[in-house]
């Protein structure tokens, strides 16, 4: 236990990284029967799909957080890299699918929206994973192993460019309300809070990567903080933002009212087509 607590970035980092995902998975377990019952009555393929994906991602993420001390064990390097690639694939799949689905608005039907979202999200996440795998196993760049590598431009330059891509994407979405495509955006404030949070997180993470690429050690603190925020809080953040209202509705007979409100707000319009 002592080795596990002191591994990685240290005891407090490990605790901060592990406790929130563990609490969230326990919460999901405690609510599973009620949630499945509600999904069965609602018969919404979209919400059911997101709930299933969130379950898989939450479990993978918890496993990653529990085993992140593997990065200090030379004999576990390959296993750690594979686990990291699979976990990041799931996290990115969820992240991209949320954007793709919500930005489609009411232009396609519910089933078409779901299939289009899954195909596009899986393609993007797969390409992302392949690129990272080539860097790790082809070029020997330890993307997921943090050690005394301040100034390693190959590694931190990659992560800097990677984070800046997401900064640009989320910044573009924040600018969309001021363009001719503003009608495609959900009207609910929670969507913009979600985008703002991820824009800020990726911006700070890019700053940390930039400092590390330049040889500035404080970048580890910044990058580590954003790493904790993403892995510890992203799955519950998605649940609270997009699914919690549905599962908290007590009266199943009021689902039509709930969906009407969500439709007016711009969420899940496709379920009504």
Image (cartoon, grey):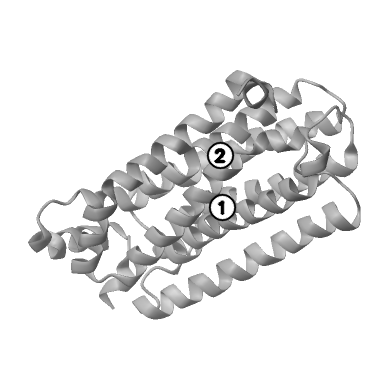
Return the disc, 1 or 2, that comes first in the chain's sequence: 1
User: Is residue 256 toward the left or the right of residue 188 in the image?
Assistant: left
In this rendering, would 7 be left or right of 258?
right
Say few, some or many: other residues with alpha carbon within 10 Å of mark 1 (under 14 / 14 to 19 / 20 or more). many
- Classify 227 as above or below 36: above
Asked if disc 1 and disc 2 are in contact, CB closer than 8 Å, the reply is yes
Q: Position of residue 77 (x, y in %)?
A: 79, 44
Estimate how packed mark 2 is, as few (under 14), some (14 to 19) or many (20 or more) residues with alpha carbons within 10 Å. Answer: some
Q: Is residue 5 left or right of residue 189?
A: right
Label 2: element kind: helix
> Vertically, is 208 above or below 230?
above
* Residue identifier under label 2: 230
Residue nearest the viewer, comparing 232 with 5:
5
Label 1 sits on residue: 91
- Please tell me which residue is depicted at 18% across the width and 63% down the height of the picture: 260
Quadrant (top left/top right/bottom left/bottom right) for the C terminus: bottom left
Residue at x 83% of width, y 23% of height = 216
Q: Position of residue 265 (x, y in %)?
A: 28, 57
Estimate the x, y position of residue 143 in percent, counting from the top left. 79, 44
């Amino acid at each position: 236990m002592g080795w596990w607590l002191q591994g990685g970035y240290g005891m407090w980092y490990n605790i901060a990284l592990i406790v929130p995902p563990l609490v969230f998975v326990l919460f999901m377990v405690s609510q599973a029967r009620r949630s499945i019952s509600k999904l069965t009555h609602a018969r919404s393929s979209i919400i059911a799909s997101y709930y299933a994906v969130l379950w898989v991602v939450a479990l993978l993420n918890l496993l990653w957080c529990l085993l992140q001390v593997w990065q200090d064990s030379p004999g576990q390097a390959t296993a750690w890299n594979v686990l990291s690639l699979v976990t990041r694939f799931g996290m990115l799949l969820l992240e991209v699918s949320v954007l793709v689905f919500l930005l489609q608005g009411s232009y396609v039907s519910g089933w078409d929206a779901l299939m289009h979202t899954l195909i596009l999200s899986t393609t993007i996440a797969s390409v992302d994973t392949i690129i990272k795998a080539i860097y790790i196993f082809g070029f020997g760049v330890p993307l997921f192993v943090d050690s005394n590598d301040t100034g390693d431009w190959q590694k931190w330059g990659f992560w800097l460019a990677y984070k800046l891509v997401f900064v640009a994407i989320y910044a573009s979405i924040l600018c969309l309300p001021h363009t001719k495509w503003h009608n495609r955006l959900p009207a609910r404030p929670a969507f913009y809070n979600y985008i703002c949070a991820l824009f800020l997180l990726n911006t700070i993470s890019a700053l940390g990567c930039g400092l590390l690429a330049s040889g500035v050690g404080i970048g580890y603190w910044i990058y580590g903080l954003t790493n904790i925020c993403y892995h510890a809080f992203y799955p519950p953040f998605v649940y609270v933002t997009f699914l919690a209202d549905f599962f908290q509705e007590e009266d199943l007979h009021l689902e039509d009212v709930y969906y009407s409100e969500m439709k007016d707000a711009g969420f899940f319009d496709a379920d009504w087509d």
